[in-house]
Image: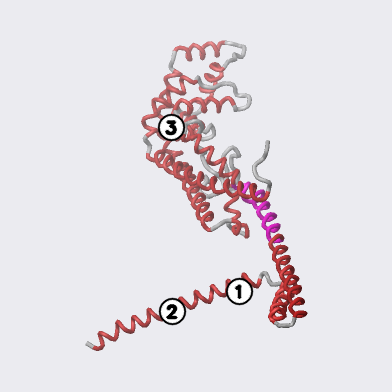
Amino acid sequence: MKQSMVVPKVKWLSNSWRSFTKWVTGIVKWLSNLWGSFTKWITPVFCIGAIMVIISVVLIASHNGIFQAAGTAMLAAGLTIITTTLTSRESISQQFAKEANITRKYTIYGPLFIELKQIYEWLDEARRKEGPYPYYIYGAGGEPESTRYSHNPIYPTFLQWPQFKEDYRIDSFTPNARTLLNDVQRLIADYNRAMGATYNPAIVTLTPHVEKAIITWMESGSFKEWDKRNSESQTWQSGPEHNWNYILKTSLAGTDMSDMSMRFTTTWVGPFRGLGWLIAGDGNKTALYIQGGYNTQGNMTGYPPISWLEEIINEAWPELDTLQEIKEARVVAEALRIRVQEAEGQLEAGIRLIRDQYEGGEPHV
């Protein structure tokens, strides 16, 4: 019975001792910080002023009128020295703070803000179906293997923060800002992987519809008539439809219809950036973008009619729109958009604070 009572008592004493030592450690740390804050203001001139104040108090306390008068004069001089020293030190500190923060604005916060703003605009436009989702955002990880050698400059980048966090520039950010920017980087890597995961499923889903449409086109009376006329003619015909017919016929040479259709689909989804519009959820703009891809191919003036492309996309749309990989990419993209907006807002607030405090406030023009 006694032994059972001793155990709780020992435990209570142990907890009490730990609480006491923790309290003492806290007091020592507080006093150390207080002393550190005090000593940073101590300079030889400050010490002289403090000594003069102490001596003046002794002189004023005496009953000798001459000493009291001298003490009063010394007190005024000592207080002036102390006040001037503190004011000068604060002025220098503010000047250093101004220079440091203006440097941060133009070399750290500004470049990072520009990147975040561009990423947000891409994602927000895609969310509103006014632009395609970027296939990847370069610099955060998770990009396609091909970007190891080169990346498409049209896509947004996230290069600044991964560099800042690896060196002394990380001290320009608060712990909360670091956490937020790390979340943004993680979500960008997730976004890149999610977008990459949609590539093959989209091609596999779309290819049969492309093959069907090409077969129907090449079996049509107008194509056969063109083919006959083109074979008999000794002069080169021109025009988008002629050139498109020529592309189809030459593309089929030496291969089968399935392989040709797969090549077409891969080009539409990849280099012509149709995938971004598919994930944004706009089939008609996907078709328009694919047609635009042909228009940018140098001297190649042949391109498929927009109505033909729209028919292919619309026919495949129920399958494309419900692909699990595309659904997941949209979810990740929205989570990233929200987080990027938070980070952009914090940086913008910091940049405006520096402008208002150190650069004269809002512009007049």
The numbered mark at residue 281 is 3
Along the line of sight, the residue nearer the viewer: 162 or 16: 16
In the rendering, at what x and y percent does residue 17 appear? 41, 81
Q: Which of disc 2 and disc 3 is earlier in sequence?
A: 2
Q: Amino acid at mark 3?
A: Gly
Q: Nearer the viewer, residue 207 or 25?
A: 25
Mark nearest the camera among 3 and 2 is: 2
The residue that mark 2 highlights is 20
Q: Where is residue 215 shown, x and y percent of the image?
A: 43, 22
Q: Earlier in the sequence, mark 1 or mark 3?
A: 1
Q: Which residue is mark 1?
A: 35
- In the structure shown, which secondary structural element does the residue marked by tag 3 occupy? loop
Residue 95 is covered by the magenta coloring: yes
Quarter placement of the N terminus:
bottom left
Residue 154 percent across, percent down from the top left = 59, 37
**Helix, strand or loop at mark 2:** helix
Bin the neighbour count of mark 1 within 10 Å (Cα to Cα): few under 14, some 14-19, many 20 and up. Answer: few
The residue at the point 39 percent across, 33 percent down is 321
Between the residue at mark 1 and the residue at mark 2, the CA separation in whole angstroms equals 22 Å
Answer with the quarter of the image where residue 219 lies: top left
Residue at 70% of width from left, 81% of height from top? 58
Residue 249 appears in the rendering: no
Point out the stretch of residues depicted in magenta. Answer: 92-112
- In front of the other: 195 or 17: 17
Q: Position of residue 167 (x, y in %)?
A: 61, 59
78 vs 182, left or right, is: right
Magenta segment, prevailing SS (helix, strand or loop): helix
Check the image and name the residue furthest to the left.
Answer: 1
Amino acid at circle 2 = Phe
Label 1 amino acid? Trp
Assess disc 2: are there few (<14), some (14-19) or many (≥20) residues with their C-alpha within 10 Å of its C-alpha: few
Q: Quadrant of the C terminus?
A: top right
